Amino acid sequence: MAEWSYRTHTCGALRAGDVGRPAVLLGWVHRVRNLGGLVFFDLRDRHGLTQVIVRTGSGAEEDAGRVRPEFVVAVEGIVEARAADSINPRMLTGEVEVVASRLEILNEAKTPPFGIADDKPVAEETRLRYRYLDLRRPDLQRNLALRHRVALAVRQYFDSEHFLEIETPILTRSTPEGARDYLVPSRVHPGEFFALPQSPQIFKQILMIAGMDRYFQIVRCFRDEDLRADRQPEFTQIDVEMSFATEELVYGVVEGAIAAMFKVAGVDVTAPFPRISYDEAMLRYGSDKPDLRPGMPISDVSALFAESAFSVFRDAVAAGGVVRGFVVPGGAKYSRKDLDELAEQTRQLGGSGLIWVRLAQGAVQSSALKAAGETPLRQAFEHAGGEEAGLLLLAAGDAPLVARVLGQLRLSVAKREGKLAPDDFKFAWVTEFPLLEWNADEKRWDSMHHPFTSPRPEDVDLLASAPGKVRARAYDLALNGSEIAGGSIRIHRADVQRQIFGLLGLSAEDARARFGFFLDALEYGTPPHGGIAFGLDRIVALMCGEASIREVIAFPKTAQAVDLMAGAPSVVDDKQLRDLRIAVVAKPGSDR
Ligand code: ASP
């Protein structure tokens, strides 16, 4: 058979205007219908689908009778208009079909473990094991194409803002982002290890010391974290650092970058984004990554119950706790069963109970009406912004617990009320984070972000006396309940950096051993600087309306940190271990 020329068109290209023209298409057989004298199939590639017809007597019918889904074929033929009643408006090529004069099976395919053409749910394990087949499905093709365009927009944007993309090492030293490091043994230096970067943090700061002024990088980061839903051991950040940065400068650059990225997905982003302090976010949304879509903010009504007849609330306030709640507009319609379910959910979240108050035809009804009396309940309802037909849900206890419980309850109610539309994008800056949080297990302070985050100048005096009160020059960007970016203005003075290491329990010798090179660099004319890192996987997942970042990563690991397709991690040859002078003490399968 004669050689095939390359395709004349992709499978998504032909239109009514091409009728009468010859075409060569190359692709995968998507669906086949064999009607005896006539074989129809859809031919697929990344660009789309085209219907092909093979008629008896065309010379191609014998091979056409053999084709099965996922066979790779070449088709030559003439583009014809489809009959009016067979036009498919859902296909870009739906007005035409290619009538084949020649067909060649370039490769056969085994029957795939799941249909590429149907969108029936397939177990994720199977999808990941056969990722090359999964990636042929339209959703993943669309997601990866969008990801590519977003990454391109990022590069164009930062270039236009005079940033340089600079690569930083993958084989490096430990970076303190708070997770465990992945280690790589050095064969040349037995007993010594590289760490894979949890982020390029120290390198990007050194690039500022090195006078690079504005840096960005689309970069893989590695964190050996305990299993948490939807975390990946390796993930992609858009990492950014600027010399002479202020918070305002960072916010402006980031809002521009977000607008450029979302434009690719057809979403117009309105900047500036609202700003919420960490304390307010915890109070109003019970989360440091607030989801602003549903409204329904939480209100503190503790003062109304300090002297209440209702002992549950009065005692909580007397013990230094809080009474807080949020209003579900229209929630007065909830049935007894609905309310019982919400109370049960509250207990499962760790709360001690849930009190409801509703306003129906002007009358206050409540599960605590007898115990608390109408007046404080009506005041609480009004204080929380309740209106006719609304439902106020109240919980009491320690502030952090109540914040967490109500924060999660609010999201679950928002979900059942249909207030979490995936295409409604609501951004918010969260600012004024505490610099440090107390680590009760190890009896020392931990950085809330990382140890290079600058304290606010007005709080520096508190570093010695009340470290827990020091606020950081740190900021996160939240989108629909996810943290999509986080960063800070950095410490640029070696003395302050040493003081922070001290608070974190690092002795001067430890600090020198781990970060000596960085402390040295800080003393050679370090400009004030700051930056941020965006989670590219999460951003693209949100744009695609996907719940999991695995849906926007070509070859992700499972939640158990395993690559099911490649079979990684895996045991290695004894010879490799000997070269590295490594002995494995607990073999896989043993429980030591
Ligand atoms: N290195 C930080 C992170 O990966 C981001 C930053 O502070 O720029 O979370």
Image: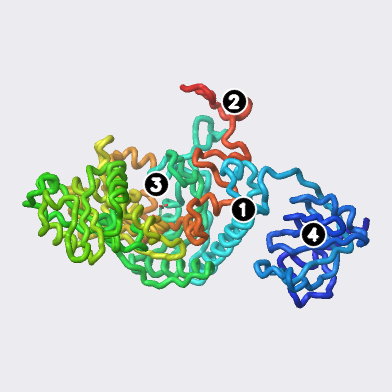
Residue at disc 3, CB closer than 8 Å to ligand 1: yes
As measured in the structure, the alpha-carbon distance from the residue carrying label 1 to the one carrying label 4 is 21 Å
Residue contact at pointers 1 and 4, CB within 8 angstroms: no
Upstream in the sequence, badge 1 or badge 3?
A: 1
Q: Which residue is mark 4?
A: 40
Q: Nearer the observer, disc 1 or disc 2?
A: 1
Mark yes or no: residue 472 visible.
no
Upstream in the sequence, badge 1 or badge 4?
A: 4
- The percent position of residue 306, horizontal first and vertical second, equals 9, 52
* Front-lying residue, 120 or 238: 120
The residue drawn where x is 77% and y is 55% is: 32
The residue drawn where x is 75% and y is 59% is: 43
Q: In the rendered image of this protein, does residue 238 appear above or below residue 133?
A: below
- The percent position of residue 12, horizontal first and vertical second, equals 71, 66
Q: In the rendered image of this protein, does residue 153 appear above or below residue 128?
A: below
Identify the amino acid type marked 1: Asp
Mark yes or no: residue 31 visible.
yes
Q: Which residue is mark 1?
A: 119
Q: Which residue is mark 3?
A: 177
